Image: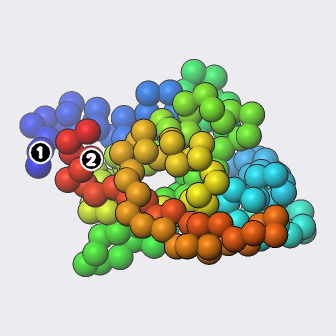
């Protein structure tokens, strides 16, 4: 466990805790909500993150993102993701449901479909992990992904998550059942990455 030896070390930590190599976390802006709602509601992306595809009223995801991003308790945090270099808004990340004494939370992330496959998602996940362990005091961060979402599973694996189980045939799409992968990372594993 490290301790700050100076004001400079403490302020450097504060300045960097919300930054990855390429992305930065910031508070949610009202202008982010329209894009988040579009990404959340688009059927081609809903299939990767929700258990069913249903048209939803415009703006229905806004309250969900506002709640995740209120940062009103120590149990949950939510941030908008922007590219450091351009300050372009590209997604949202949340750590929610933190519990005591388990000190465990669930990770959720959504990224602009145009920005997938460019390393931004992996950097955002790594930054969220660092925040969860160093700022929230978590011991465990977990997530779930559909087995067919191999791109997300690869990004999570690159960030240090390991598959710890699966819920067999947990979701029904395209006339067939698909598995749900459960992944996690522990603080002691992250310390050694």
Mark 2 Cα-neighbour bin, 10 Å: few <14, some 14–19, many ≥20 = some
For the residue labelled by badge 2, is the local secondary structure a helix, a strand or a loop? Answer: helix
| Residue 151 found in image quarter | top right
For the residue labelled by badge 1, is the local secondary structure a helix, a strand or a loop? Answer: loop
Q: Reply above or below: 119 against 54.
A: above
The one of 60 and 45 positioned closer to us in this rendering: 45
Q: At 24% across and 50% down in the image, what residue appears? A: 189
129 with respect to 56 (left or right): left
The label nearer to you, 1 versus 2, is 2
The one of 38 and 4 positioned closer to us in this rendering: 38
Which image quarter holds the C terminus? top left
The one of 43 and 167 positioned closer to us in this rendering: 167
Check residue 3 in the rendering and tell me which mark sits there, or answer none.
1
Q: At 35% across and 69% down in the image, what residue appears? A: 104
Q: At 86% across and 69% down in the image, what residue appears? A: 54
Residue 45 horizontal/vertical position (percent) = 76, 52
Mark 1 Cα-neighbour bin, 10 Å: few <14, some 14–19, many ≥20 = few
Q: CA distance from mark 1 to mark 2?
A: 18 Å
Q: Reply above or below: 5 against 101.
A: above
Residue 105 horizontal/vertical position (percent) = 41, 67
Residue 129 horizontal/vertical position (percent) = 38, 49
Colour scheme in the image? Answer: rainbow
Return the residue found at the far top: 85
Check residue 173 in the rendering and tell me which mark sits there, or answer none.
none
Residue 174 seen from this side: yes
Mark 1 vs 2, N-terminal side: 1
Residue 69 seen from this side: no
9 with respect to 105 (left or right): left
Check residue 190 in the rendering and tell me which mark sits there, or answer none.
2
């Amino acid at each position: 466990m490290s301790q700050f030896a100076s004001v400079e070390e403490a302020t450097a930590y504060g300045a960097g805790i919300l930054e990855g190599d390429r992305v930065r976390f910031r508070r949610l802006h009202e202008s982010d909500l329209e894009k988040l709602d579009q990404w959340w509601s688009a059927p081609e992306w809903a299939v990767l993150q929700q258990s069913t595809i249903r048209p939803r009223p415009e703006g229905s995801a806004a309250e969900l993102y506002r709640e995740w991003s209120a940062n009103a308790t120590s149990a949950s945090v939510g941030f908008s993701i922007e590219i450091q270099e351009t300050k372009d808004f590209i997604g949202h990340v949340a750590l929610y449901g933190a519990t005591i004494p388990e000190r465990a939370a669930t990770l959720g992330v959504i990224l602009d479909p145009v920005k997938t496959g460019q390393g931004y998602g992996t950097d955002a996940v790594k930054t969220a992990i660092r925040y969860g362990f160093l700022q929230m005091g978590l011991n465990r961060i977990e997530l779930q992904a559909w087995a067919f979402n191999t791109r997300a599973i690869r990004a999570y694996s690159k960030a240090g998550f390991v598959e710890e189980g699966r819920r067999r045939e947990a979701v029904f799409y395209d006339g067939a059942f698909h598995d749900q992968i459960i992944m996690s990372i522990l603080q002691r594993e992250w310390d050694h990455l």
